[in-house]
């Protein structure tokens, strides 16, 4: 005999867990399936183990999508304040780190536990290590094939996320099933990902400095981190979502600093000191050392004319670099692109062509900036679908 549920959700990540709690709120029978051994694994590793669970300044402008308006409705109906209410009810302590980014004071597993408790409170069932091989749709709803038998569902939610970090079980499952049901999937690519430059920056690995990283599409004033393989850090991760193979990026290594003016003033007072000593007030010493041959940073400050100081400022403000690539899905925090939004209702995340089919979270072509935006989209899209299912 086939087990049947009012709602089956595939994917026990951020979106699936929260959707299960919302969909079960009116007594609906909800089953949450995942092929992994544990739920919410990306929540667990997120934010350096403290989960940057939302951002106080969420607007649709913090998301990339073919349709920049699509996310507005769900984001307006479930806000960061709504998630904070939940966090407060579960007595989870948090703090704002920077730029509106909210993190747990303790471990990110507190958020997973909170979502599991919310699910349990409405009687939703979690079944792990259960891959779904096929999904069929008929007049009675959906029929899923799993290793332990068939499962029937009146409504089906695809919450299996994107392709980033395949080692953690990420798959293109939602895209495949969406395509099976006639949905278009936009081009997908790794985003919030370090950019590679061969081993050019290996000697600087570990050095971090505030920059403005930009290209023709976007600009981010955050920190940059040199790595053995290239560049990372928030400024680069953010810009990577707007970068395409073969394109150059621009780095301002001295954001907001009128370096030539400052060095001219210093030259009057301490012209006999090495120019590198003066530059080390504005840049990490190892970076100054690495730039010395290229920029001719030798001798005392007094040896450098106004014109030379201006040349140094210009060279530090406008560094044009062309990445050889990105680290790809192996380390990308998110997948850019996904199930095209034109096929989904923006208020409920339900398919416009297959009634009862919902697609939420990262699987949808809505990709947030770094800083808690992706989890806020997971919560908001899950709430939209969960509420609609609960009301059916
Ligand atoms: P996921 O959380 O990826 O969940 C998908 C679930 O589906 C997984 O449990 C997976 O096992 C399951 N699944 C996949 N395929 C199948 C299948 N075929 N069958 C059954 N189950 C399947 N965002 C933030 O906002 N703040 C952060 O601090 C942050 N830090 C991050 C750090 C890292 C290292 C990474 C990789 C991401 C981070 N993100 C962060 C992004 C955030 O984790 C994701 O955007 C978010 O988890 C997406 O939620 P989701 O539920 O849509 O997908």
Image (cartoon, rainbow, N blue to C red):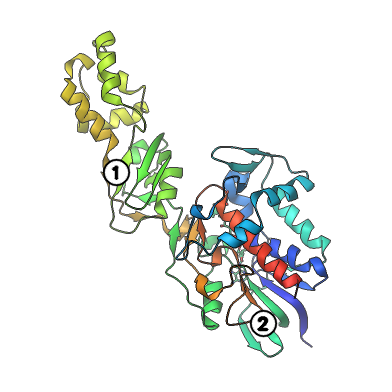
Looking at the picture, how far across and down is residue 43, in whole percent?
63, 53
Q: Is mark 1 within 8 Å of ligand 1?
A: no
Closer to us: 84 or 134? 84
Mark 1 residue element: loop
Q: Residues within 10 Å of mark 2 (few under 14, many from 20)?
A: some
Query: Is residue 25 visible in the rendered structure shown here?
Result: yes
Q: Quadrant of ligand 1?
A: bottom right
Query: Is residue 125 visible in the rendered structure shown here?
Result: no
**What number is the disc on residue 200?**
1
Looking at the picture, how far across and down is residue 286, in whole percent?
34, 29
Mark 2 residue element: strand
Instruction: Determine the residue positioned at 77% across, 78% down.
Output: 5
Please report whichever mark, 1 or 2, sits nearer to the chain's N-terminal start: 2
How many numbered marks appear? 2
Q: CA distance from mark 1 to mark 2?
A: 50 Å
Q: Given contact means CB atoms under 8 Å apart, are the residues at marks 1 and 2 in contact?
A: no
Q: Residues within 10 Å of mark 1 (few under 14, many from 20)?
A: some
Is residue 171 rendered to the left or right of residue 196? right
Instruction: Determine the residue positioned at 34% across, 28% down.
Output: 257
Quadrant (top left/top right/bottom left/bottom right) for the N terminus: bottom right
**What number is the disc on residue 144?**
2
Looking at the picture, how far across and down is residue 238, in whole percent?
44, 49
Is residue 257 rendered to the left or right of residue 145? left
Closer to us: 129 or 126? 126
Instruction: Determine the residue positioned at 68% across, 80% down.
Output: 147
């Amino acid at each position: 005999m086939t087990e049947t549920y009012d709602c089956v959700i595939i994917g026990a990540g951020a979106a699936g867990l929260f959707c299960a709690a919302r969909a079960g709120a009116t007594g609906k029978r909800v089953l949450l399936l995942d092929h992994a051994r544990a739920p919410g694994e990306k929540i667990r590793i997120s934010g350096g183990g403290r989960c940057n669970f939302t951002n106080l300044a969420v607007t649709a402008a913090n998301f990339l999508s073919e349709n920049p308006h699509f996310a507005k409705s769900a984001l307006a109906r479930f806000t960061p304040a709504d998630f904070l209410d939940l966090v407060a009810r579960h007595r989870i302590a948090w703090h704002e780190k920077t730029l509106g980014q909210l993190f747990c004071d303790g471990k990110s597993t507190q958020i997973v536990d909170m979502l599991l408790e919310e699910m349990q409170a409405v009687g939703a069932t979690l079944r792990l290590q259960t891959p779904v091989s096929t999904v069929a749709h008929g007049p009675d709803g959906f029929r899923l094939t799993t290793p332990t038998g068939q499962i029937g569902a009146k409504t089906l939610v695809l919450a299996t996320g994107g392709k980033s970090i395949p080692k953690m079980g990420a798959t293109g499952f939602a895209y495949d099933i969406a395509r099976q049901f006639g949905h278009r999937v936009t081009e997908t690519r790794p985003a919030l990902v370090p950019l590679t430059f061969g081993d050019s920056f290996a000697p600087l690995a570990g050095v971090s400095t505030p920059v403005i990283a930009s290209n023709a599409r976007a600009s981010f004033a955050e920190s940059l981190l040199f790595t053995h393989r290239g560049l990372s850090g928030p400024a680069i991760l953010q810009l990577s979502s707007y970068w395409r193979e073969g394109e150059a990026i621009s780095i301002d290594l001295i954001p907001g600093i009128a370096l030539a003016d400052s060095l001219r003033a210093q030259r009057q007072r301490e012209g006999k000191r090495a120019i590198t000593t003066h530059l080390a007030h504005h840049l990490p010493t190892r970076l100054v050392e690495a730039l010395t041959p290229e920029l001719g940073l030798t001798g005392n400050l007094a040896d450098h004319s106004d014109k030379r100081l201006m040349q140094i400022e210009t060279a530090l403000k406008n560094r044009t670099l062309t990445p050889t690539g990105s680290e790809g899905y192996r380390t990308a925090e998110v997948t850019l692109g996904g199930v095209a939004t034109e096929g989904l209702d923006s208020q409920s995340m339900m398919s416009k062509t297959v009634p009862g089919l919902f697609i939420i979270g990262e699987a949808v072509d809505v990709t947030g900036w770094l800083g808690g935006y992706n989890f806020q989209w997971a919560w908001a899209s899950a709430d939209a679908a969960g509420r609609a299912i609960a009301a059916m």
